[in-house]
Amino acid sequence: MTDNKAVYLEDVEIGDELPTQARQVNMEDVRAFLLVWQGPRGLEQPSRFNSEDQARRERLPGPIVPGIMSMGLLSKMVTDWSPTIQLKTMDVIFRQVVPQGTEIRFYGVITDKHEDREEVEVDLYLGPLQGQPFIRGKAVLGLPSRGE
Amino acid sequence: MTSETQVEFDRAVLGKTLEIGPFPVTREHILAFTRAVGETNPLYTDDEAAREAGHDSIIAPPTFVNVFIIGSKRPDPKIQHGTLSFLASQALECCLSVKPGDTLRLFTSLEDVYAKTGRAGTMVFAVWKTEVVNQKAEVVAVARESFVRR
């Protein structure tokens, strides 16, 4: 968020959680993303992302959220935390498809802190409100020191 | 437990680097991406805030490069397994900011193809590595993703 206050290396400890975000990703959101990703073709060609029928033909319960859109949403959760954050690496595993139209939650936990490199490591999760995450990941974030 | 299985595919594709692009980066494309994922960080939406942070203008969110990488016209290794392909993982290294006016090129290669057999049956993974390079020949991102076929 634009009004989030700046976070510095000195403010965080291992075990701290990043502010959790939650939202639904609906067909309308996915269609907007498909247009950015694939252009008009992304809307014209039936796919597992934009067509109930195609999703079922692919033995999915319904249309799903594109993996790269989920990555964009996870990245947003991280960079929303503080304007001082620099996302250096993000490594994610897609364990299950992300269904459209259900409430999903994004959260992260600091797992390591490197004062010499001004970096923190975080575990990232994207999942349902209850149950196992659909996506798990790790990220390395640059977080500056106050230099006091 | 899993076990290794031999996979039939076009081995001529393996390890060969292919250049894809160029992709001009426009301000409109970056802003459309930020809207589509609901970005509110002013570095990605507000020129003035981006300039205060030391940039010339807005910059693209870190995963913006994926719109060029994922689904790019890579050669088909013709893997003889399954009919459906899903993104299984991605490791993305963000090296430099991408900004409006940049021209990106991808250098991509198929690094590995392997099968794993577990409780859910046999799945075949294809691992691609892509370097994203800007007009100054600087590497802006390196991505390694695996697709699973089942």
Image: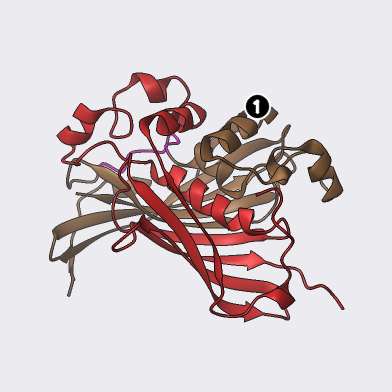
Chain colours: A red, B brown
Range drawn in magenta: B71-78
Q: Main secondary structure of the magenta part?
A: loop
Regarding mark 1 in the picture, which secondary structure is present there?
Answer: helix
Q: Badge 1, how many Cα within 10 Å: few under 14, some, many 20+?
A: few
Instruction: Evaluate whether residue B19 shows in this view.
Output: no
Q: Residue at x 31, y 58 (%)?
A: A95
Q: Position of residue A116 (x, y in %)?
A: 73, 81
Tell me if residue A11 comes above or below residue B16 in the rendering.
below
Instruction: Evaluate whether residue B20 shows in this view.
Output: yes
Report the residue marked by disc 1. B28
Q: Residue at x 74, y 61 (%)?
A: A6
Which one is nearer the viewer's eye here, B66 or A36?
A36
Q: Position of residue A142 (x, y in %)?
A: 68, 66
How many numbered marks are there?
1
- Relative placement, left or right, of A121 versus A49 is right
- Relative placement, left or right, of A8 versus A41 is right
Q: Is residue B127 magenta?
A: no
Quadrant (top left/top right/bottom left/bottom right) for the N terminus of chain B: bottom left
Q: Residue at x 44, y 63 (%)?
A: A137
Q: Residue at x 36, y 18 (%)?
A: A44
- Report in which chain the residue with disc 1 lies: B
Q: Which kind of residue does numbered mark 1 sit on?
A: Glu
Q: Position of residue B124 (x, y in %)?
A: 23, 55
- Relative placement, left or right, of A23 versus A15 is left
Which one is nearer the viewer's eye here, B9 or A16?
A16
Quadrant of residue A26 within the rendered picture: top left
Q: Position of residue B123 (x, y in %)?
A: 20, 56
Q: Is residue B76 magenta?
A: yes
